[in-house]
Amino acid sequence: MRFLVVLCLLLVSWQARAQDLTVFAAASLTDSLKEVAAAWVKDGHPALRLSFGASSTLARQIEQGAPAAVFASADEKWMDYLVQRKLIAADTRRSLLGNDLVLIVPANTPRHVTIGPGFDFAALLGRDGRLATGDPAHVPVGIYAEQALKKLGAWDTLAPRLARAEDVRAALLLVERGEAPAGIVYGTDAAVSTGVMVAGTFSATSHDPITYPFAATKTGDGPEARALLAFLAGPEARAIFVKRGFKVE
């Protein structure tokens, strides 16, 4: 009898763990998804395991077998990357959010600028200053930044002066610490920091639309993962995302 009781307890514990979901999400979703995760638990679900980083890094980890149930990317490219490798439950994919691309400076050296063709980024950076953003080779915010700078005719001059960060939050931190006099991040990241201010916003026509596709992975797909995706698209989560500055698709 004691053995059966122990076995039942172990089975219940295993089932509870099996229901836990791991979410791999773009670094720019950190604060909003933590708040959404708390609402998810309050709604009666097991706690989520959240892992944040550059969408490129997370996508490659999923490709290598990392046990993510849901992937939230900061661009369509890295979701496409996993779809092409048949690692995403394609019918669950949905782009839920949008964002702005902004130029930030340290809060203790405030300034407002109008970003357009001919804008003097070199004067903003000074002689030795670097422009912090995600690495354009793979980090979405850096890819958007490269597109915008090329549109403005400033890429050739600024490419050698980039401080190429591993994700958008690392770029934000460089400006917060005063290690870079300016940076390019998302509007929502600038909003969570008291150490930076938005100096200007890039035109939405200067880069591809900033969209956040969410989807279940093939290995993590199931009723609970789909319930989470429905919750993320629902009114409570949408209100949180809007409060945090995201555009709701």
Image: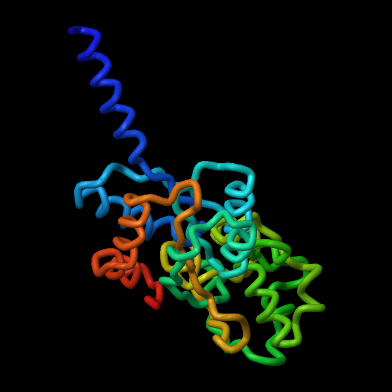
The residue positioned 60% from the left and 60% from the top of the image is 171
Q: Is residue 194 visible?
A: no
How many numbered marks does the figure carry? Answer: 0
Res. 242 image quadrant: bottom left
Please name whichever residue, 17 or 30, is drawn nearer the observer in this view of the structure: 17
Q: Name, please, the residue furthest toward the top.
A: 2
The residue positioned 62% from the left and 86% from the top of the image is 206
User: Compared with residue 136, is residue 98 higher up or lower down, i.e. above or below?
Assistant: below
User: Compared with residue 182, is residue 113 higher up or lower down, i.e. above or below?
Assistant: below
Res. 144 image quadrant: bottom right
Q: Quadrant of the N terminus?
A: top left
Q: Quadrant of the C terminus?
A: bottom left
Q: Is residue 33 left or right of residue 100?
A: left
**Image coords of residue 245 (percent x, y):** 38, 72
**Image coords of residue 49 (percent x, y):** 40, 43
The residue positioned 48% from the left and 73% from the top of the image is 187
Q: Is residue 127 left or right of residue 241?
A: right
Please name whichever residue, 8 or 61, is drawn nearer the observer in this view of the structure: 8
The residue positioned 50% from the left and 73% from the top of the image is 211
**Image coords of residue 131 (percent x, y):** 68, 68
Q: Is residue 240 visible?
A: yes
Q: Is residue 121 left or right of residue 178?
A: right
Please name whichever residue, 35 or 175, is drawn nearer the observer in this view of the structure: 35
